[in-house]
Every structure is written in C-alpha cells, then in structure tokens.
Image: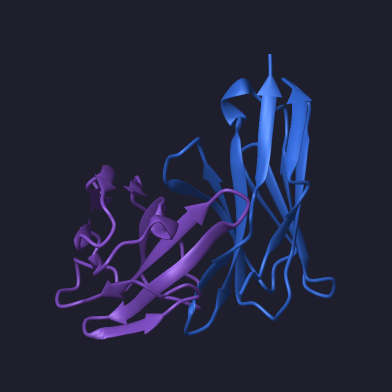
Amino acid sequence: EAQVTQNPRYLITVTGKKLTVTCSQNMNHEYMSWYRQDPGLGLRQIYYSMNVEVTDKGDVPEGYKVSRKEKRNFPLILESPSPNQTSLYFCASSLSDGGPNTEAFFGQGTRLTVV
Amino acid sequence: SQQGEEDPQALSIQEGENATMNCSYKTSINNLQWYRQNSGRGLVHLILIRSNEREKHSGRLRVTLDTSKKSSSLLITASRAADTASYFCATDQAGTALIFGKGTTLSVSS
C-alpha cells in the first residue's frame, strides 16, 4: 500500500530536549516536505527536499533541521525544542514539483507538545 | 508566503445541499489542487486542475479555475454528513513547494 509513515503520532517533550520525527515513504517519490499546522494559520511549509542530499528552507524553518540521506526518508529534527514549536506536523511526498504529477501524499501527522 | 486564500472560512449546510468554496491566489501557477482534511488527520488529495483547464469533475466534486481572476472554486453537490471536513486549496510554485491556504471548514448536518 502506497503510504507516508510518520512516527511518533503523539509526543510530549520538555524544552531543550532534542527530538526527531521520522518520515518514510514507499512510493519512490523525489519530493518530500514538512509542514506545521496551527489554528488560524493553516499549513506552513518548514523544509522541503527535491531529491537525495537536496534540501531547502520553506516559510518557517527556524528551529528545525532536516536531512535526506536516502530517497525514502526525510526526518525532521528539533535540536532544542521550545513551546512555540507545539504544533501538528505533517510530512508529505510527491513525484515532482511544478509538473502535472504533483499530487501530494500526506502522513497521518505528529502532534507535538513542548512544555 | 500564503499563496491561496479560501473563502468562506466556515460553512454550515444541511445534507443534500450544495457547498461552494472559493480560493484566490496571487501569482501564476502551473496547477491548483484541492485537499480534504478530517479533523486532525492527514490531508487527502481530491482533485488537480491545470492552468490550461477551466473546469474539472470528479464524482460529486466540480472544480473551476479562472486564471485571469486568479481564483478557483470547489463545488460539492448533494452534500452528506461524511463531507464534514476542512478543505484546502494548494497552488504550486515551480521549483519550490505546494503552498496551502488556511482552509474552509465545512459542516454538514443531517
């Protein structure tokens, strides 16, 4: 089954404790991205990756890191989480960006609470 | 950069009625997509319309695109309670990303 898998689904952590949210897709997609969703603000892109070893900042990259060592995985790293990073996070993948095959597949989300 | 803006922010209708949501965007696009999100879940792709298309249908969904006005509309006909969800438009910016609007929350009561 084609899918994007995020882990964990729920996470409560303390300020400053490094954490990683994993994202994996089994569709051989080149393009992957991370979004955060906050009430009243919609989805905002954090980082994206056009392919292996190619990543770039989205609209709200501060406080986040990513890596793309393998095509299928795109982890999101919070080196020193702060309460303003409490949010619902989504990973998405698609075949390409800007062309006709740009249907994005989303993971189920990770609800992160930083206290 | 918020590319798409949906209107209205919230919409409440009765089962069987039609629901219309609008999306406006700012810059030229290659295509525009609509997604659906059930409460707190991941987004699900509904339909994609290319910049050279004016209208597209998929089941009870009808999407229009007016590139001269930089706007799109999503019509859901004969709404059902199961259509209750948030709906987002997303536009592509070549070489960057899918940019989402803030969404329209649709509530369909039986």
Residue A25 visible? The answer is no
Q: Is residue A30 above or below residue B65?
A: below
The residue under the point 78% across, 73% down is B67
In the rendered structure, the answer to whether residue B59 lies left or right of residue A64 reads right
Residue A90 appears left or right of B47: left
Q: Residue furthest top?
A: B110
User: As drawn, is A20 to the left or to the right of A85?
Assistant: left
Query: Residue placed at 78% from the left, 26% from the top?
Result: B17
In front here: A79 or B108? A79
Point out residue A67 in the picture as x, y percentages from the top left corner.
Answer: 22, 76
Looking at the image, residue A61 lies above or below residue B100: below
Q: Which chain is blue?
A: B
- Chain coloured purple in the rendered structure: A
Most foreground residue, B65 or B99: B99
Q: At which x and y percent is residue A114?
A: 33, 51
Image quadrant assignment for residue A52: bottom left
Q: Which is more toward the observer, A32 or B76?
A: A32
Instruction: Tell me, yes or no, if residue A7 can be seen here.
Output: yes
